[in-house]
Amino acid sequence: MTTLFISDLHLEESRPDITEAFLRFLDETASGVEKLYILGDFFEAWIGDDERTPLQEQVATALRKQRDSGTDIFLMHGNRDFLIGQDFCDRAGATLLDDPTVVDLYGTPTLLMHGDSLCTADLEYQKFRANMRNPQWQQMILQRPLEDRQQMARQLREISMAKNQGKEETIMDVTPEEVVRAMEAHGVQRLIHGHTHRPAEHQLEANNQPAKRIVLGDWHTHLWWLTVRPGEEPVLQKQPL
Ligand SMILES: [Mn+2]
């Protein structure tokens, strides 16, 4: 029995090497596993399930094939692809997860998040996030013509890049107190998230007990994944693209 976690692939047309690495990962590493969790920023951008680019179709087909061979697939939104909807999930055979979600990992309750909500020092971003995650705002956006949304996505990306350039490293990382708060609110000793692109395992204390925060890596230069098996400590693994 094996469960795998990945996040922050940032799949996009201009990086076919990452798509290839992902397809290879499904065929090799993920072959025969029980569950595969994708914890956000799977795609670099998402403007609605109706876009249906060849890349999106290719990825949906590969996930569906994986599901049909016996792997349950779970998808959580990231800050890039939070508009992924039920339609894409149906095509991919994936179950959309709320952020946060607590799952029982072979007897260990584990909190799953994308991770952007933990970066509370970035007040400007948190305000932006609250707007973007508003269902009414999302419905309004999704009703606009595809071309408008494509244009908007390009603008948002430029604004985001310009803003992040001037930001302190610590602001872009999670706030330690918020990590503890989230873990205590959910009564867990283990948290898995992505988003920060700082793959690591952190020991901390929550609920007055030892706790662990595992951060998944992005796929810019390496494939990163977390392997979890019953009775074993989770293992963070990587491989060059
Ligand atoms: Mn992210």
Image: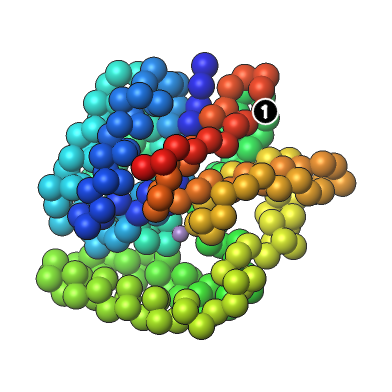
Q: Which quadrant is the C terminus positioned in?
A: top left
> Which x, y percent locates residue 41?
39, 54
Q: Nearer the viewer, residue 59 or 49?
A: 59
> Which x, y percent locates residue 213?
67, 46
Left or right: where 32 falls relative to 181: left
Image quadrant where residue 155 sits: bottom left
Look at the picture and state if 26 lies above or below 138: above
Look at the picture and state if 4 lies above or below 167: above
Q: Which residue is mark 1?
A: 233
Left or right: where 136 falls relative to 53: right
Q: Looking at the picture, which amino acid does disc 1 mark? A: Glu
- Residue at 39% from the left image edge and 53% from the top image edge: 220
Q: Nearer the viewer, residue 226 or 120?
A: 226
- Residue at 43% from the left image edge and 45% from the top image edge: 222
Look at the picture and state if 157 lies above or below 27: below
> Which x, y percent locates residue 60?
23, 39
Badge 1 marks a residue whose secondary structure is loop
Name of the residue lying farthest toward the right = 208
Q: Nearer the viewer, residue 221 or 144?
A: 221
- Residue at 13% from the left image edge and 47% from the top image edge: 54
Question: Is there any visible trace of residue 89 in the rendered image?
Answer: yes
Image quadrant where residue 190 sits: top right
